[in-house]
Image (cartoon, rainbow, N blue to C red):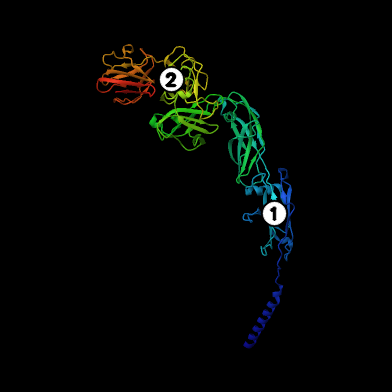
Amino acid sequence: MKLFNKLGLIMLLVVFAFAACEKAPDLTYYKEGTAVVLSSSSATVTPVPADSAKVILTLNWTSPAYATDSNTYKYIVELDSSTKNFSKPNTVILTGSKTHTITGKQLNNMLLNYGFALGVPVALDFRVTSSYANNNEQYKSNIVKITVTPYNDPSVLVTEKTSIAPALNTASNPSNKFTWSAAFNGYNGVVTYSIQYDSATKNFASPQTIAVGNTIYLKQLNEGEMNETALTEGVAGGTTGKIEYRVKAVTAQGAISYSNTVSVTIATYIPLLRFYMPGGYQTATGNGTNWTPGDAPELIRDTRPAALNKLYYIYIWLPGGSEFKVTQGRSWDVNYGGTGGVLAPGGANFTVPADGFYRISIDRTSLQYDIREGRMGFVGGATGAGWTPANVFPNYAMGNSATNLFVGISDFTVNGWKMIDHNDWNSGDITVSNARSYGSAGASGSNLEVNGANMPDITTAGRYRVIWDGRGIDNVKYEMSPAAEMRVVGDGIQGVAAWNPGASPAMTYMGNGRWQISITLIGGKDIKFLAGNDWGAFDYEDNSGGVTATGVARKIKWEGGSNFKTPTLSGTYTIVLDEKAQTVTIN
């Protein structure tokens, strides 16, 4: 019985082995295929926007002749710029088909994603990789070269209004809305939009730009902003002009497209843009708190029509190494710095090399700045310099009294004259570095005009004191009065009635703004200087903080100061009052 069972088991294993040997020939055999041959419908393609939805390129290839159903063949169509060896291909995977069509927009977007420039032909390489559905037996085709030119697919811009009349008192009200369609429709990268504008007929030769952002198709400008676009492009305040606008679209790879142009006629108004000069010099010079626009000195606005909202300047004393910037308004929201004469939004701090009085000018439209010596002097037939600016400095210079304030004494003859801050005349240009002469049609106390008419003729020859006063930013003016005498007045003069101008001793004029006298002073008392024999005349007071030391030049001021203190010890002293240097020294 046991022997029978063993024989049966052996026979069963033999049967199974035989059956297994019989099934091996049933496995499927896949023979090798061949690389496909790729061809193109065209070697050169130059699509236009109208071709966006049209098939502009057809690729065909032969069969790889794999040993399976051809409907399961896998094809990878690759595209890359020539010479790149398909290092960054654009791919499409197909199954079964031996042809691939590409529309104008599909091809254009591929090119934009590569970063090719619009309108510039580029060479592309195409190839097809075939395989079984499971990626086995991969073969690469021949490479077909095709030259393609990316086309512009711009936004379409629409303006809400074609004519506006903004006003100063409604400057913050909405004025005009610009809307536009997407550029590069179908492109899958980021597109950044901005609005450019220029005056009509200039064909955007030097456009200004308003930033918008990514994937934004609307920009609302208020009355002030629309007015600003016109002023910036040369439409003078109070006149009417036409401004052209367009949308600039830029892909992440740098392709640029411009929309159609729209025009808006703008009746402008004169705005009140103001600029200030915060910096590290403020606290030390009595001009507020360091780096604080809220109490920084204000720049003067050049009110000439061509310079309005363009040129700003200031005459100011600064310590050497001072750093500062310029802000539009009393905040840091809009601020300017710069280097090498180029004004830059948010740019590097300005600086000056040495202690001195400076003229600092900015041109906010051409983005330029100029820093030079700040000075003022007399020029004209009534002055010793004559009508030659090169003769003005230093002999006919005025004294730097304070920020935007000059005081000077000169002998005038019967003739015309002006004040000037440079050793040459302005050439007629409106630039940041131009010379500024000042004239006025009115008498003392009248407004000054940059590069305006001559001052009223001197009718009586003599010595006069002139004040150039730009402390009132909106009302730069001058004061002029006779400078025949200067007296020392106070309760600190030995043998002189206290505070009696008519009885007080007169100083001797030494020329070039210097007065001198030797008198006996009473120690620890008060004096001041009066340009006349009665109260109400021009006078000088202390601006040194109460210095009493002898031999020290004390700063003076002519409006609202304290009395000077006499030296501690009584005695005979020589006093020199220097109106050009704006100091007094007691020796």
Task: Say if residue 275 shows up in the picture.
Answer: yes
Look at the numbered disc 2 and give the secondary structure of its residue: strand
Comparing 2 with 537, the one in front is 537
Task: Say if residue 470 shows up in the picture.
Answer: no
Q: Which mark is residue 145?
A: 1
Pinpoint residue 472: horizontal percent, then vertical percent. Answer: 46, 22
Q: Which of the image's four quarters has the N terminus?
A: bottom right
Name the quadrant containing residue 321. Answer: top left
Pinpoint residue 20: horizontal percent, then vertical percent. Answer: 68, 77
Comparing 66 with 113, the one in front is 113
- Kindly identify the amino acid type of the residue bearing the numbered disc 1: Lys
Q: Residue drawn at (53%, 34%), measured in percent from left and top?
A: 367
Vertical order, 231 against 529 (above or below): below
Name the quadrant containing residue 226. Answer: top right
Count of marks placed on residues: 2
- Kindly identify the amino acid type of the residue bearing the numbered disc 2: Ile
Comparing 534 with 28, the one in front is 534
Q: Which of the image's four quarters has the C terminus?
A: top left
Q: Are marks 1 and 2 in contact (CB under 8 Å)?
A: no
Look at the numbered disc 1 and give the secondary structure of its residue: strand
Q: Which mark is residue 156?
A: none
Pinpoint residue 305: horizontal percent, then vertical percent. Answer: 56, 24
Q: Is residue 549 left or right of residue 451?
A: left
Distance in Å between CA atoms under marks 1 and 2: 80 Å
Q: Residues within 10 Å of mark 1 (few under 14, many from 20)?
A: many
Q: Which mark is residue 467?
A: 2
Q: Earlier in the sequence, mark 1 or mark 2?
A: 1
Pinpoint residue 107: horizontal percent, then vertical percent. Answer: 68, 49
Vertical order, 132 against 278 (above or below): below
